[in-house]
Image (cartoon, grey):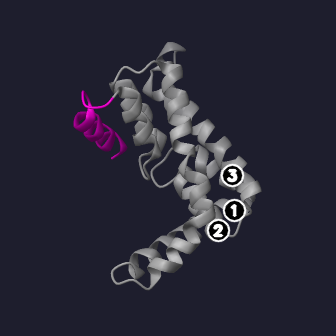
Amino acid sequence: MTEMLADYFVELFNGKLPSEVIVFFISMLPVVELRGGMIAAKLLDVELVRAFIICYIGNLIPIPFILLFIRKIFAFLRDKKGFSKIIRKLEESSRDKGKKALRWKGFGLLLFVAIPLPGTGGWTGALVAALMDMRMKISLPLIALGVLIANLIMTAFSYGLLDFIGL
C-alpha cells in the first residue's frame, strides 16, 4: 500500500513541484511517512543523502504537534457527529499497540517506531505515547531515534544498498 501511495503522489505532482518538495510532503503524511518518502525519492532520482535528510525531517515535523495536541483534538472531535466512532477506534487501537510496545518501556516505543511495517512509525508512535501519557522529554527522543533507524532501513531497501553489500 505504501508503494501505491508513493507512486500516486509522484505521478500527481511530478513536474508540478520540485522532487524534494514532493518527498518532503510525502514523508510528513500519516500512514506513508518516510517509508513512502524514500520510495518516492528513489522514483524521482533524488540523491541518497539528500533524500535521507529530507525524509527524516519531514517525518519528524508532525511528531511534537501530535504529542502536544492529539488528546485535545480527540476530546474536541469526540462529541462531533461522525467522529466519535473514528476517535474511539483510534484510541483503542493505539492503546492496544501501546500496551504491547510499552511492555519494554521506552525500548518498546523505539522498536515500534523503528521497524518500518504497516501501522508503525512516528505518527503512530507519537499517538501511542500521547495516549499512554508518556512525557514528551522521554517519548520525543525515542521516536526521533526510531525514525532515524527506520530511515536507515528504508534507505537500504529503496536505494538497493542491500544488493551493493551482497545481501
**Who's the residue at 31% across and 44% down the image?**
5
Say whether marks 3 and 2 touch (CB < 8 Å).
Answer: no
Q: Which residue is mark 3?
A: 140
User: Is residue 43 something that shows in the picture?
Assistant: yes
**21 or 37: nearer the viewer:** 21
Q: Which residue is mark 2?
A: 99
Q: Judging from the image, what secondary structure is the residue with disc 2 in?
A: helix
What x and y, as percent, mark residue 54? 51, 31
SS majority, magenta: helix
Say whether marks 1 and 2 touch (CB < 8 Å).
Answer: yes
Query: Which range of residues does the magenta coloring cover?
Result: 1-17
Crowd rating for badge 2 (residues with CA inside 10 Å; few <14, some 14–19, many 20+): some
Tell whether 85 sits left or right of 97.
left
Q: Taking 127 as reference, is 55 above or below it?
A: above
What x and y, as percent, mark residue 51? 48, 26
What x and y, as percent, mark residue 143? 65, 49
**17 or 111: nearer the viewer:** 17
Tell whether 135 sits left or right of 157.
right
Q: Which residue is mark 1?
A: 102
Which of pointers 3 and 2 indicates the residue nearer the eye? 3
**90 or 24: nearer the viewer:** 24
Callout 1 amino acid: Leu
**Who's the residue at 41% across and 28% down the image?**
20
